[in-house]
Image (spheres, rainbow, N blue to C red):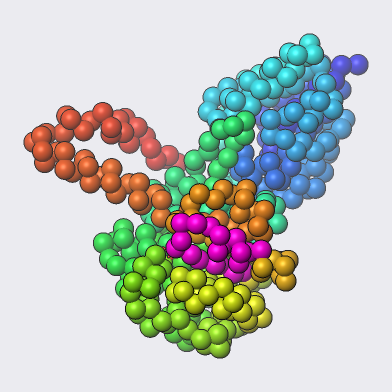
Amino acid sequence: MKTVYTCFCTDVIHDGHLNIIEKARKKGKVIVGCLSDEALIRYNKFPTISQNERIRLYESLDGVQEVIVQNDMFYDDVIEQLKPDYVLHGDNWKEGPEKAIRNHVEALVKAYGGELIDVPYTYNETVKKIDLQLREKLAMPEYRRKRLRQLISMTPIVKVMEAHSGLTGLIVEKTVVEHDGTLDQFDAMWVSSLCDSTAKGKPDIELVDMTSRFRTIDDIMEVTTKPIIFDGDTGGLTEHFVYTVRSLERMGVSAVIIEDKKGLKKNSLFGTEVQQTQATIEEFSAKIAAGKHAQLTDDFMIIARIESLILEQGMEDALQRAKAFVKAGADGIMIHSRKKDPAEIIEFCDRFRKEDKATPIVVVPSSFNVITEEELAEHGVNIVIYANQLTRSAFPAMQQTAVDILKYHRAKEVDDRLMPIKNIITLIDEL
Ligand code: SPV
Ligand code: MG
């Protein structure tokens, strides 16, 4: 009997999947692959049910004889193991970043005389509705909020990109790239105080008030599903911070990061060039403890950001604070540096990890940008935040366009580097 393989990465079975199974069972024994969580989050939508639940769901389908876990999004592991006579997949993977996977699988099966069959994709009203319902489910506060903790346990390093508007949120939500034989995408969004303030033409000194910052979060949440880490600056007065925690939690934000400064906060990348005051260990520990006390769900995270390296207070001070803040209840530690060389960040992570194997470490490699995600993960980092790169890429492009239109008294000269009108009017999906 011939063997037929198809890989599923869905939480809900619809007509399209049933059609593939129907076609497959006519050709032989049907084996369904369940794409592992780790591969799924880089490739497709975040799962709303666990890997085991997906396996059970696929096993319950009529005509499916066996379900196996597929760990490699490019199929190498299962093809090597099964050498199926046929591999079936919806023909929607002939376009977009998934095309690379399709071409790779085609070459793999051809090599031993197997056959890849592209089944015409079923896209009816029911399928469309199921897709939308799944998206909506992921956008709901109770799903979105817990997703950061889930990601930390699912992937070696959680990749976070800055967003400060609906549009930048959409870029983080939808950008998927195929590169070096793998697909990749961002896991979460960082609502940076620097970029949120800059987008409003204001300095990053806690001037943009919380109501306005929440408005930004809401704009992003309206059009995305990925989890949000909020830059809470100093957290403000402890008496105010407890309300902020409640509001963020209720909105479905996953984490707030607060920094151990007090008084007039300036951006960390100024370092000691401006007057900035660090809170004492006792003061900041009390703020963290009050925030944890106010929190109602187990999902939300309060992450303590240590400014000792920024303010040149030394490694020992940074490590002592990290220990104290974890003791006060912090769910994670962010260590910041404005040096180009990542050495001090690496030293902190290695020494912190020696004593504390579990507490998540967060870094923001704006200055020490030579270090890769893989290297950071090797030193125990769990979350990497690209804190301002979208803003910094958009601003020079917009400024140059403004300069050139003024120079040439028309827009023709800049047109080549602009997005075509057709693309901008179709950029945003309509319901
Ligand atoms: C931000 O993005 O606002 C941050 C990170 O707080 S940094 O600008 O590096 O201080
Ligand atoms: Mg900030």
* Percent coordinates x, y for residue 113 in the rendering: 79, 11
Residue 65 position (above or below residue 431) = above
Res 240 quadrant in image: bottom left
Residue 402 part of the magenta segment: no
Quadrant assignment for the N terminus? top right
Q: Residue at x 64, y 45 (%)?
A: 41
Q: Can you give x and y, in whole percent of width and height, for residue 327 in the image? A: 66, 81
Side of 265 where 251 appears, left or right:
right
Left or right placement of residue 100 versus residue 202 in this view: right
- Residue in front for this viewpoint, 252 or 383: 383
What x and y, as percent, mark residue 8?
Answer: 72, 34
Between 315 and 35, the one nearer to me in the picture = 315
Residue stretch rendered in magenta on the structure: 332-350
Residue in view at x 65 percent, y 57 percent: 379
Residue 219 position within the rendered picture, expressed as x and y whole percent measured from the top left:
40, 57
Quadrant of picture, ligand 1? bottom left
Q: Does the image show residue 148?
A: no
401 or 40: nearer the viewer: 401
Q: Number of numbered discs present?
A: 0
Residue appearing at x 50%, y 71% in the figure: 309
> With respect to residue 100, does 329 lie above or below?
below
Residue closer to the observer: 405 or 427: 405
